[in-house]
Amino acid sequence: MILKIILIFLFSFSVFSESKNLNRKEVFLNRFQLANTLAEKFGPNSKPIIEKYIFSRPSIFYGPCDIYGQVYKKEKDLPVNILPSSTCYSGLTENKITLNATTSKLRQALMLKSCIAFVENESTFNFFKAKYKINKKEQVSLAFYPSRNFSFKSTKLEDAVVEICISKGWQKI
Amino acid sequence: MDDTNRRIFLKQLLSTLGYSLLPSNISAKTKTTDINYVQINIAGGPSRWSFDNPIAPLVGSSYVPHPMIVNNFSNTGPIASLAGLDYQRFKVNDWYMPQFWKDKLLTSTGEVQASSLLNNCLIVRGCHMRNDGHSLNNRKLSAPIPGGSSITGLLADKMGEKLFPSINLVGDSGVEAVAGGAFKSKENSIQINTPQNDKNPLSYLLSPFLISKPHKARWLHLIKEELGEVGLRNYKKMLQDFNKRVTEYQRIINFSLDASYYTSIGERPVQGADLKAIKEGRVDPTLAKYLNYDFLIGNSDFRTILVKAKVKNLAEQFATAELLLTHGLCGNITINVNTVSNLFYENSIANDKFSREILSVGSTQLSYKGGNDRYTGAKHLNNFQLDSHDTGLLPNIFLTHALFKSISSCLAEFKLNLEGKSLYDKTFIHLASEFDRDPRADCSGSEHGWNGHISSFYSGSIKGLKVVGNIFTQSPGDSYYTKNGTWGQGAPVKENGNRPISYGNIASSLANVLNIESPSPNDRPLFERKAGKVNSFINEVKNIDS
């Protein structure tokens, strides 16, 4: 019995003493995943905003470019068909950027700019409200957190949409 | 407790202790570093003999002269003549450095002697890069083991709360083929590459936080909530400061490009090539000394090659780096230096009007094809090829001087501002290119000196000037030319296990200073930083007869 107690103590001690050095890294949506999710919520007119603030910043939002997408086949008389995912904005080294995104102040700042732009653009904001049938702030939760309520600090609808849009919960994998 | 029970007890004890051996590098909390690192990268590998590669650093250093490794017109008279060129040294404390360091550099507080930078300088010479090649060796400057972690990547992992873990200020050389393209961290840290030769890299970097006034007022509560103090900083003031600093750095660079201030080479008109009498067929071999890869330069006073010269984007990159450091936004920056461009050619002849005959190793015969085509003008494409295979003696003397004086002047100004914020002691500046160069006997250019890389370091934590590393007085082989005079080919160092210094040694040394793990752990470091001071483990600085 005493032996068992000693063993349990030693086991717990060694696990807890090492676990304080362990930090499980949080993984967030990368630029491809974000682009798809936001485009769904804010409609086709959100694409220029997404491109400007999110998609063209792979070093901040992660997600490698497609190195083979640089080589494209041009059919006669047809426009060149280059996949957006293949664009390596600052060179081919972008193909080494990892798939898994982490968060940073830079990411937060650009998400804030994007979400403000979605709300200030009549077309994207109306698309969002129509899609989720939103008339008041309390209904916004479902658009980003279908299975739980989001606790808002904002009172106005536009502010609430930006607040929930920049929240980290829905961006975490 | 009997034997059986004791054995069972020990077995169970050891099995529980297994949990304490969990790999602690899996998402382990990392410590931060308190040292900033700035790499000034000169892709192309221009010759460093007349700058920070002292070929005879001690009073008794033996060396074998080479006609291309010269830095002084010793003839008297109103015109500096080619026949009077020789190599002179300048004493800095107990060291003998090239004459370059006698020059005056302009800063915002006035002129300073170039050698003042050497008050806090460590030079590692004779480093063997093991293979030839630009891209391979320039990328090694960050990641010494190709494909492995980079110094900038490992440092980015330790940048803690700094806004930017790593920044690469991109110049003409782009990203992939140079050190910036070898960025690799262990903990998914990012490096931001600015757009190539961006006129305002600082604005690009700060763009996520630049919010117009009406927007800021409207969304202030969310900016505060989400970004905290970072979102509320006065970035507008930073950008105004940037513009002022660019103007100042540009003024300093413009002064650096005035050849009439170049000590020992520019004080009087310099004999130019006489192209008026040139006839079809083989030409005077001396003319090869005036070749600048695309043109045979016929300026009557050779100094005028620099009258309209520029070094694109250098002011913007230094201004950006200075503000990032002094505002605590980033401590891990790569500056990529562009070449000296917009050279003025007077009455010059295009290179394609000449044919070249290789007579022997290092010996070229030029033959003129004829015609009256002459070129006079200055344009961006008239530039100094940093990979100076076909940069003859005269252009090499003046253009390397222009390049390194521009860089040194910016460095002096940079140092001044870091000292003003008590940051110079905590900043480690690394001036590097792929390699030095192996000069041709006919003075028509130089080849890659992959076994003679130079790295020079500048920091307040380095006290005085120190030069380390052995070189051969004459190359014994394993280079383009043998018995080619003393240019800096690395020789074995007893203190380094009787081997020449390799870049892995330099990388391990940097890791020591920056408090990161070495990206090349099998290579011993050459120096360390302890109690705020850099100490060298090796002292050898010999010129060895092969």
Image (cartoon, rainbow, N blue to C red):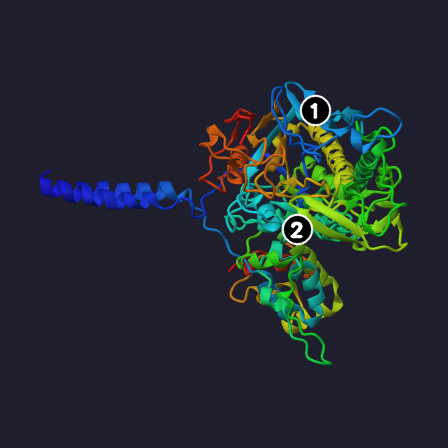
Along the horizontal axis of the image, is A28 left or right of B323? left
Alpha carbon of mark 1 to alpha carbon of mark 2: how far? 40 Å
Answer above or below: position of A37 versus B133: below
Q: Which mark is residue B193?
A: 2
Callout 1 touching callout 2 (CB < 8 Å): no
Mark 2 — on which chain does it sit?
Answer: B
Q: Amino acid at mark 2?
A: Asn
Could you say which quadrant of the image residue A133 lies in? bottom right
Q: Are marks 1 and 2 on the same chain?
A: yes
Q: Position of residue B278 (x, y in %)?
A: 87, 47
Q: Say which residue appears at 51% left-offset and 56% top-offset.
A: A27
Tell how many labels: 2
Q: Say which residue appears at 71% left-offset and 28% top-offset.
A: B87
Along the horizontal axis of the image, is B180 left or right of B509? right
Q: Position of residue A154 (x, y in %)?
A: 66, 55
Q: Position of residue B506 (x, y in %)?
A: 54, 36
Q: Residues within 10 Å of mark 2 (few under 14, many from 20)?
A: many
The residue closer to the viewer here, B492 or A133, is B492
Is any atom of residue A3 visible in this view?
yes
Along the horizontal axis of the image, is B186 left or right of B104? left
N-term mark: 1 or 2: 1
The residue closer to the viewer here, B355 or A72, is B355
- What SS does tag 2 mark? strand
* Residue corresponding to mark 1: B89
Q: Say which residue appears at 18% left-offset and 40% top-offset.
A: A2
- What SS does tag 1 mark? strand
Q: Amino acid at mark 1?
A: Arg
Of the two numbered discs 1 and 2 in the rendering, the one whose residue sits closer to the viewer? 1
Q: Position of residue B393 (x, y in %)?
A: 75, 39
Mark 1 — on which chain does it sit?
Answer: B
Q: Residue furthest left?
A: B2
Is any atom of residue B428 visible in this view?
no
